Amino acid sequence: MGILSYDRKAELIAFDETKTGVKGLVDAGITEVPRIFLLPSPENLNSDQELSLPTIDLKGIHEDPIRRKQAMEEVKDALGSWGFFQMVNHGIPVDMLEEMKKGVLAFFEQDSEVRKQWYTRDRSANRVVYNSNFDLYSAPVANWRDSVMCTVYPNPPQPEELPSPCRDIFLEYSQQVMKLGCSILELMSESLGLPPNHFFDMGCAEEIQVTGHYYPPCPQPELTIGTTEHSDAGFITILQQDLVGGLKIFYQNQWTDVRPIPGALVVNAGDLLQLVTNDKFVSARHKVMANKVGPRISVASFFLANLKPEALKVFEPIKELLSEDEPAKYRSTTAKGFLDYFYSKGLDKTPALLHFKN
């Protein structure tokens, strides 16, 4: 066992030191998945079932009170059961979505020597963090995915701090996604009978991270995974995916595909949202399959609380949602305490929320 684990560590380091990620392996023409990426048993690439994720039309929610009430109920139902929904007529122009995907693609397809300059595992040192697998050294299996991440709020980066292929669009897109996220948080607050600003005032959008994921084509997709089964750590995630597909969510004890809808965005609840709503909203498990086709591009915008070490704001189940029949199911935590636990654990299939159960 000692030799095996030593070998794995050496191979992880060798992979990390290339600074070219999974794309570098594919560019080198590999025909077999290296062992650091191998799953204990092959993945079933087919879907267990053909259920359709709820799709919510946001048209008119700011002008028409009847439409708004209807959308509120749809959001409440979707986040209470699926933990996910797709949304159309969300206000971000389709050409901006396309430009954002193109910007992420252009970042990964620039010359590897240029790309390497952005490669780091120190999330605090750089405004832009490019690497492969944030949890490379802690997770049981490496994922077939490279990522580039930037914190865009509360202190947006200066244009010169961003990589040139996605500089302008990154800033434009993040402003639009912030506005949209705040609208979604309002609908969520109202749907639970809380004031519209409740989630925002709590700090659910104090920090926003935008991450571009690049999933290269894989020669043996059933032997590995694009992203291991997990739930997100924060409050909400707004995801843009291209038309390649591969995102699956766990619903009613089965895995089901999230079929891409052109121009739509996907919203999901994170663990901290489930904690503060005392399970009124659920943070659903999801994963991304590896694929012979690619690359697949997705852009995830994570709405988080302030993660600075000095931010000691405590998060706990919202008092207005508790009663004698429904006492608090979770203990209080700071956002940093929660995220530190999430990152140290890595994506290992066990829900981080379990650690905070009463």
Image (tube, rainbow, N blue to C red):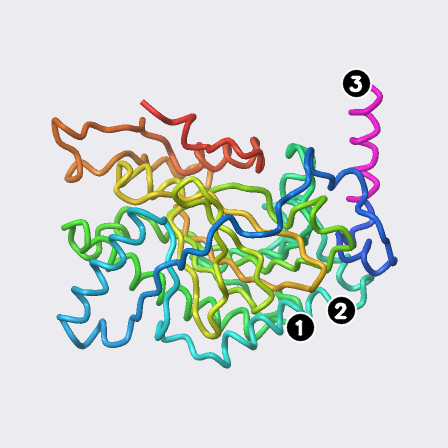
Residue 264: percent from left, percent from top:
43, 70
Q: Is 253 positioned to the left or the right of 183 in the image?
A: right
Whether label 2 touches label 1, CB < 8 Å: yes
Range of magenta residues: 1-16
Identify the element where label 3 is drawn. Answer: loop
Identify the element where label 2 is drawn. Answer: loop
Decide: few, some or many residues near mark 1? Use Cα within 10 Å; few <14, some 14-19, many ≥20. some
Query: Label 1 belongs to which residue?
Result: 165
- Please name whichever residue, 327 or 120, is drawn nearer the observer in this view of the structure: 327
Which is in the foreground here, disc 1 or disc 3?
3
Which is in the foreground here, disc 3 or disc 2?
3
Q: Is residue 16 visible?
A: yes
Disc marking residue 110: 2
Lower position in the chain sequence, tag 2 or tag 1: 2
Cα separation between marks 2 and 1: 8 Å
Cα separation between marks 3 and 2: 40 Å
